[in-house]
């Protein structure tokens, strides 16, 4: 219910390399998208149609947080905030004037600085370009905890998934979280939680079991064909 049944249906019926869609299928998919995306109207003000926070971006990795933030804008969000390190901020700012960039992720009071913005955000994305510096990971842990307290939906990707594989309890049981691993990230998470290697003959079952082990979080395993499960059903 937190993610929304319409959004889940859009994901489940999204385009596949192995499926030819009829005109009827296309019309149904477009209608589902219309149900999810708020219509443009003069009665709404900037910020009502989506305020997204991206936590990530360091000296070595500036592209991933930019693409995550700008994509949110391109699909209809109004505001994208990037919480990155000081070294990454100027680079990311130079990519686009549309992004709001906060050079705070490596500061001593990073968690507090990000927490101040959380009440203004509809969701946060953890991990793009985060890297594995211990200071940044510790700050990210604090940001995850603060986001959970406020009930904010959390999407975890990239090095955020590496952090979760090291400490699953950070997000386990928080059903407003979506994990988006590729195959290698999924394997790492699966082995950390289930203590067994992934069964290559049962990808759907593995996604289902990992979701259940994580407390029925939504898992989106990315690949040639994306697999999604909330621990009760899968696609």
Image (cartoon, rainbow, N blue to C red):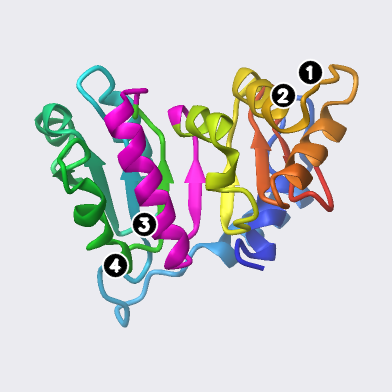
Disc 1 to disc 2: CB gap under 8 Å: yes
Q: CA distance from mark 1 to mark 4?
A: 41 Å
In primary-sequence order, the first of circles 3 and 2 is: 3
Rendered-image quadrant of the N terminus:
bottom right
Local packing at callout 3 (Cα closer than 10 Å; few below 14, some 14-19, many 20+) is many
Q: Which residue matches tag 1? A: 197
Dot 4 falls on a residue whose secondary structure is helix
Number of marks drawn: 4
Residue at the spot 34% in from the left edge and 27% down from the top edge: 129
Nearer to us: label 3 or label 2 = 2
Residue to which mark 3 is pinned: 77
- Which residue sits furthest bottom? 43
Question: Which region is colored magenta?
Answer: 131-159
Question: Circle 1: is it few (<14), some (14-19), or many (20+) Cα within 10 Å?
Answer: few
**Residue 207 position within the rendered picture, expressed as x and y whole percent measured from the top left:** 77, 35
Helix, strand or loop at disc 3? loop
């Amino acid at each position: 219910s937190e993610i929304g049944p319409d959004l889940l249906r859009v994901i489940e019926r999204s385009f596949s390399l192995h499926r030819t869609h009829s005109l009827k299928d296309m019309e149904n998919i477009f209608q589902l998208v219309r149900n999810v995306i708020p219509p443009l109207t003069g009665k709404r003000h900037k910020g009502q149609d989506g305020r997204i926070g991206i936590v990530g971006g360091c000296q070595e990795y500036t592209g991933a947080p930019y693409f995550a933030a700008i994509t949110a804008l391109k699909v209809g969000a109004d505001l994208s905030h990037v919480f990155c390190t000081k070294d990454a901020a100027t680079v990311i700012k130079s990519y686009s004037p549309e992004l709001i960039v906060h050079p705070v992720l490596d500061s001593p009071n990073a968690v507090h600085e990000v927490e101040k913005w959380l009440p203004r955000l509809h969701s946060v994305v953890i991990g793009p370009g985060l890297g594995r510096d211990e200071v940044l990971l510790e700050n990210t842990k604090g940001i995850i905890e603060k986001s959970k307290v406020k009930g904010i939906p959390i999407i975890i990707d990239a090095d955020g998934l590496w952090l979760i594989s090291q400490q699953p309890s950070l997000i386990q049981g928080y059903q407003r979280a979506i994990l988006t691993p590729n195959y290698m990230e999924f394997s790492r998470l699966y082995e950390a939680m289930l203590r067994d290697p992934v069964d290559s003959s049962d990808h759907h079952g593995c996604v289902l079991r990992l979701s259940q082990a994580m407390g029925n979080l939504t898992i989106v395993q990315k690949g040639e064909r994306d697999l999604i499960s909330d621990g009760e059903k899968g696609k």
